Image (cartoon, rainbow, N blue to C red):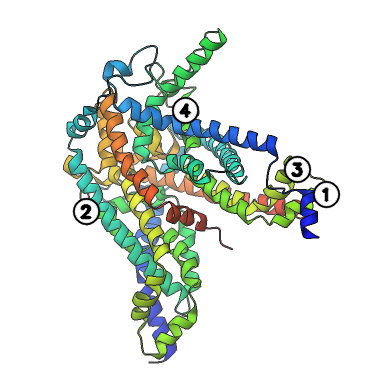
Amino acid sequence: MKADRGAVVSDPLQPGPAGRVLVYGLLILFSAIFAAPFFWLVTSAVKRPEQLMAYPIQWIPDPVVWSNFREGWEFRPFSLYLRNTLYVAVLSTIGSVLSSSLVAYGLTRIEWPGRRLLFVTLIGTMMLPGQVVMVPLFALFVRLGWVDTFKPLWVPAFFAGAFYVYLLRGFFQAIPRDLSEAATIDGASEWAIYWRIVMPLARPALATVGLFAFIGAWNDFVGPLIYIVNENNYTLALGLSMFRGQYGTYWHYLLAVSTLVTIPIVVLFFFTQRTFIQGITMTGLKG
Amino acid sequence: MSARRRNLRNGLLFCSPAIIGLAVFTAYPVLASLYYSFCNYTVLKPATFVGLANYRALIADKFFYQSLYNTLYYAVLSVPLGMVTAFLLAVLLNAKVRGLAFFRTIFYLPSIVPVVASSVLWLWLLNPDSGMVNAIIDAIGRMLGIPLQGPGWMQSPEWSKPSLILMSTWGVGGWMVIFLAGLQDVPREMYEAAAIDGAGRGGMLWHVTVPFMGRHIVFVTVMGLIGASQFFAPAYVMTGGSGEPAGSTLFYSLYLFQQAFSYFQMGYACALAWVLFAVIFAGTLLFFKATGRFAEATGEG
């Protein structure tokens, strides 16, 4: 009966042969459009300056100038910027994972009055434009003597991001309560349940938070732009932006360094694709 | 200690990062910024109260209107264009295609490229003389036998905002993933029922898919508009923070940043920030009201 009806209706989600040609045609066309800038980035990064300006355009670099990568990287102290970026990104990642998971645990696994209010307030802050708090935070960090240090870039990560709490909350709620109840009867403390039962089970969600926090810190531009003054404290994003401001005509170096700054993110994505896609899918769309 | 008291203590302890964070990094700065918006404030010297002077100055400030216009222009075009693109890509990927992971990766990757790198890249792509985009326009023109000349893109006051909108459309991968997840939640039976009713493919898309995706569409629209109203980094990197040419890329947040960190008019910057906040807040409320009615109107079908 069912099979019969299926045969009459045909699968509504499956396009017919003509439709399939159209779907693949469009997919290939859009892929070409979306991939073209990457092609242009990488090929331009290995051209000579005069090849970059050639008319008509030289699509394939000849010769391939690999040395642009090394020369561009060494033109400014990008190795130092890399170290600074890693320092901020690693601390931000640890801070985000630890603090957001603690808060998510406190919101989902402990019954206490006020937890709903706290959650709603936290989510409400996501609508607040960063520009509103920008000036007082700057003034605060000036008073603390933190300007031109890395602290304004990573310390806030230790105070739970709303988005990460939201993400983890959904995950923690799905962990069966019996597990922690059994542990409570055995005399385990709240901390032990958090650290030894919930955290290991939540590994995929924690990986998502860590990944987002790391990439967020790696890509962050506005934070360093506001708080970092001394060139020795530049991050990669700020260093690249300043490089563009000062040597805007050195396109071959600019594009080579842009490629180098992008590669780690692309590699990271390839190794963690599933975690990534799941994370975005969980973004604010459950219930 | 009673279980209730223990729970309260533990709850507060576990949530203390959020409680302290909200107090120090949100509540205090929000109140301080509201106060500063009524002050003359340079950070270096204590704030002096000036009443409504900042807001009065703002009403007479032509750059305020210019940046507001630029931002509206950007938001009104980039969000719908990005959403239609993301939706189309998601629908294509949802058609049970081979190589799904491959296509999804290509569409998603641009959205995680560091913003400074993608800004440098797009400045070069759109270089009027040596960029790829104008080279392609040129090649098409020669193929057709008519001389086509690409625009000046970021160097032209008319084309600088379209340039940035183009760039933002390249980065809609995150939205696409959200839409794709939503598409996979639409119950099959709905399509089957629609097919029995004689709906064509276009009819199904419009009458089944779009209403079912309402939640996702509203979410992406709101987040997209809030994001667009704070658009900053690409304009800053590409113009070196100037908002040129002819102020055409002086977006609201860029102007606010200039006031705060180039001219140290921190009080004025706070007033600008509060106007932005008010607009976002009112806009979001209005939007939810409007879409609430929209849901009522279409709920019948």
Give the labeled residue for mark 1: B197
* Structural crowding at the residue carrying mark 4, measured as other residues with C-alpha within 10 Å and reported as few (<14), some (14–19) or many (≥20): some
Circles 4 and 2 in contact, beta carbons < 8 Å: no
Q: Type of residue at label 2?
A: Trp
Give the residue drawn at x 55%, y 58%: A285
Give the labeled residue for mark 2: A146
Q: In whole angstroms, how far apart are the C-alphas of marks 4 and 2? A: 37 Å
Q: In whole angstroms, how far apart are the C-alphas of marks 4 and 1? A: 44 Å
Q: Nearer the viewer, residue A172 or B107?
A: B107
The kind of secondary structure element at disc 1 is: loop
Query: Comparing marks 1 and 3, which lies closer to the viewer?
Result: 1
The quadrant in which the C terminus of chain A is found is bottom right
Give the labeled residue for mark 4: B163
Judged left or right of residue B287, residue B135 is left
Judged left or right of residue B106, residue B295 is right
Q: Quadrant of residue B111?
A: top left
